Image (tube, rainbow, N blue to C red):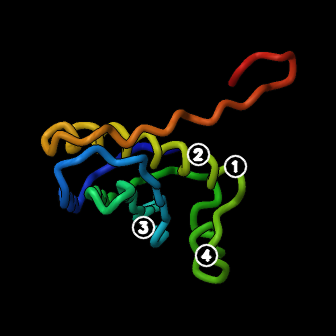
Amino acid sequence: MIVGNKIIYIEAKKEKDEPPSGFKVDMKIEDVKFENGELIVKYSYTANYEGDVGSIKIVGIARAREENGEKIAEEWKKTGKLPENLGERFANFINLSGSTNGTLIAKVLNMMPPLIPPRLRISKGGKAA
């Protein structure tokens, strides 16, 4: 369960005063550690506006409490991967944090917000989850 988030770095620039044709978002988990009973996950969210219009980069640290947190951190160091269900939770979390905070930053620079709709999953029984 993700229990905390802290933004530690923001870089934003507007190179051209013209509308971009779109943007590409890159989300990465940069590091995973186990400290004081929690997973400490360093991540980055970067929106690059096409046509070299500008970019927004946000780096943060999320904390999570997971049953096998120490094993998860050890496996990350070996493979650079998280268990699928945890990786999916972090991908959605990073997308939410990056697009929410990125929208505020984009407004200051008068650029379009870097919003990517969340991925919906259909559970058994046909309901969106």
Name which of mark 3 and mark 1 comes first in the sequence: 3
Name which of mark 3 and mark 2 comes first in the sequence: 3
Name which of mark 2 and mark 4 comes first in the sequence: 4
Residue 124 at x, y = what percent?
A: 86, 23
Residue under label 2, please give it.
89
Does the rendering let one see residue 33?
Answer: no
Residue 13 at x, y = what percent?
A: 18, 59
As measured in the structure, the alpha-carbon distance from the residue carrying label 3 to the one carrying label 2 is 20 Å
Amino acid tagged 1: Asn
Residue 85 at x, y = what percent?
A: 69, 49
Residue 79 at x, y = what percent?
A: 67, 79
As measured in the structure, the alpha-carbon distance from the residue carrying label 1 to the one carrying label 2 is 6 Å
SS assignment at label 4:
loop
As measured in the structure, the alpha-carbon distance from the residue carrying label 4 to the one carrying label 3 is 18 Å
Q: Which residue occupies the foreground of this view, 121 or 32? A: 121
Residue under label 1, please give it.
85
As measured in the structure, the alpha-carbon distance from the residue carrying label 2 to the one carrying label 4 is 16 Å
Identify the residue shown where x is 58% and y is 80%.
Answer: 77
Q: Quadrant of residue 69?
A: bottom right
Residue 31 bears which disc, if any? none
